[in-house]
Structures are given as structure tokens and as C-alpha cells.
Amino acid sequence: MTFIMPDVPPGVHPWSAAENDFAVKIRPLIQQHLDITIECVHIASDLLARAQGKRDSNLFQVHATLLVRVLQDLRACFVCTETGYPMQAWTVATSAFEAAHTIGFVGDRVDRANDWLNHSSQSKPFIPAFNALTNTIIYLGIESDAAKRTAVVEEGFALYRHLCMAKHANPIAERDRYVYVVDGKPNLLLTPPFTSRRASEARLGLLLAIRSAHIALWAFDVTHLAEPGLVNSRIGDMALKIDKLVGAWRVDLASLASESGA
């Protein structure tokens, strides 16, 4: 097997040129995603500044801590997406999903906030992702009809579970990722090439991270600032922008599932 490694000057990372090339090609496809990630940071800064001292201090500490984690995951996910590492972006996006829905699970429950602060197991999560998602959907009142609510939960969890393949190095996601046949011979390519498949993967991971950040902001606002029955207009507007990206998300997911034989 031939190893394909770029020849670069000393002190220059061998993958930099490939990363820059990927960024140039992927940026037009994710510009809307980038705009939303920037907006998330501005909204979060405003919410955190205004929420201090409004509710129980432990509840604020837990929510603020998890919100910052989600925002940092979102940024890391974008960096991985832009430079050509969709599997790493997927991994970080699933982390953002878990943290965001933990905010929703804790909700306005001070006892759950205290449980989170006192959590001592290194081997067990504070709350399983599916349970956190279900509780978040209920807490935010996303769907009042039980059957429709179940469908919303199942769709959201299906995307999370799909992206978890990257976190666990599932063979379906990895086995043909880095080996390319050239002139009938296998070549192991270390640098991230731009392909339509990787572009779809990149958008998929970034969208999960964006949706997670939106959920985190929404749950934080509902708990600490919003009046009953009201939604922050900026968070509501963001939801509409994200909805416009969901069509592409479904196409990307269906395309990747078809390629993997899932």
C-alpha cells in the first residue's frame, strides 16, 4: 500500500495545504451555518449577562457551565468541518447534543442541578441522551400531541445515533474513508480530500451542533429569563433559519445512509 504524504518545508504541517483547499471549497456550502454559529455566541453572551442572580445560584451555575460547553463544542465542530475532518466534527457534535439536552433535562429543577453538581461516576453519564432529549422536548413544550412528540424525539435521536458512529469509530463510517485505489493499487491518503460525501458529512455534523446550541439557548432562556408563554424573538428567528437548513440535512442523511447500505 502506498502512503500519500505531501512534501512541505520544515515547520509546516503536511496537511495544511489540504485543509486550506477544503476550507475554500466547503465555505460557500456552510456560510449560512457559520452565520448562525456567530449569532449563537452573541445571544448567549446577552442571556448569560442578564440571567445572573435571577434564579437559584446552583441552577445558574449548571446551566451556564453546560451552555459554555455547547458553544465551545459548536466552535470546535465548525473548525473541524471547515478544515476537512467530518468524523471529528460528528464526534464533537454528539457531545454538544448531550450537553444541550442536559440543560433541558435539568430545566427549572434545582434538585436536578444539585444532582449534576454532585455526580461522582466516571463511567456512567448523568442522564442517557435519549432520556435527556425526551425531557427537553417536554420541558420546552415543542409538541403537545404525544404521538407527534414521539416522532420528534425519534427523528432527533436518529441523527444523534447516526453521528455517534464517528465517536465509536464504527466500521461503516471508517472502512473505506482513507484508502483510494489509483491505477489498481490501494493508496492510503492521510490528508483530508474534498469530496461530495465529505461535504454532506460536514454539513450534517455542523447542523446537529447548531440545533443543539439553539436548544441550549432556548432552555436557558426559558428557565432564567423568559416570561411564561413567551419565546425570545432572536431565538425564535434562529429556529426559522435552522428550519431552512433541515431539508438539506435530510438529503445529506439519506445520501450517506444509502452509500453505507444502512
Image: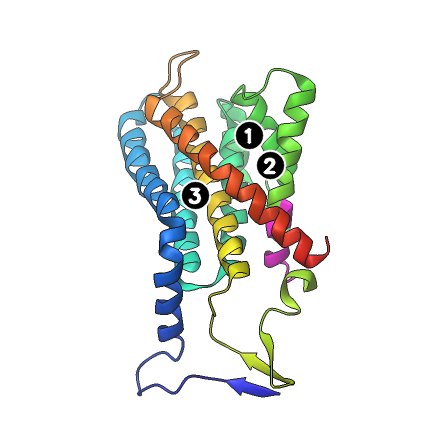
The colour scheme is: rainbow
Q: Mark 3 — residue?
A: 70
Q: Residue furthest right?
A: 261
Q: Nearer the viewer, mark 1 or mark 2?
A: 2
Q: Please tell me whether the stretch drawn in magenta is mainly helix, strand or loop.
A: helix
Q: Nearer the viewer, mark 2 or mark 3?
A: 2
Task: Using the numbered discs, state the Cα–Cα distance from disc 1 to disc 2 in whole angstroms.
Answer: 15 Å
On the image, the x and y values in percent for residue 171 come to 69, 64
Q: Residue furthest front?
A: 183
Which residue is at 27% across, 26% downward?
50
N-term mark: 1 or 2: 1
On the image, the x and y values in percent for residue 178 come to 58, 73
Q: Nearer the viewer, mark 1 or mark 3?
A: 3
N-term mark: 1 or 3: 3
Magenta segment, which residues? 161-169
Q: How many numbered dots are placed on residues in this image?
A: 3
Number of residues whose C-alpha sits closer than 10 Å to that of mark 1, classed few (under 14), some (14–19) or many (20 or more): many
Q: Considering the numbered disc 3 on the image, is that residue within a helix, a strand or a loop?
A: helix
Amino acid type indicated by mark 3: Val
Q: Is residue 229 above or below residue 189?
A: above
Task: Using the numbered discs, state the Cα–Cα distance from disc 2 to disc 3 in whole angstroms.
Answer: 17 Å
The reply to whether the C-beta atoms of the residues labelled 1 and 2 are less than 8 Å apart is no
Q: Is residue 122 visible?
A: no
Q: Mark 1 — residue?
A: 105
199 vs 43, left or right, is right
Q: Which mark is residue 156?
A: 2
Q: In this orientation, which residue lies closer to the viewer: 130 or 37?
A: 37
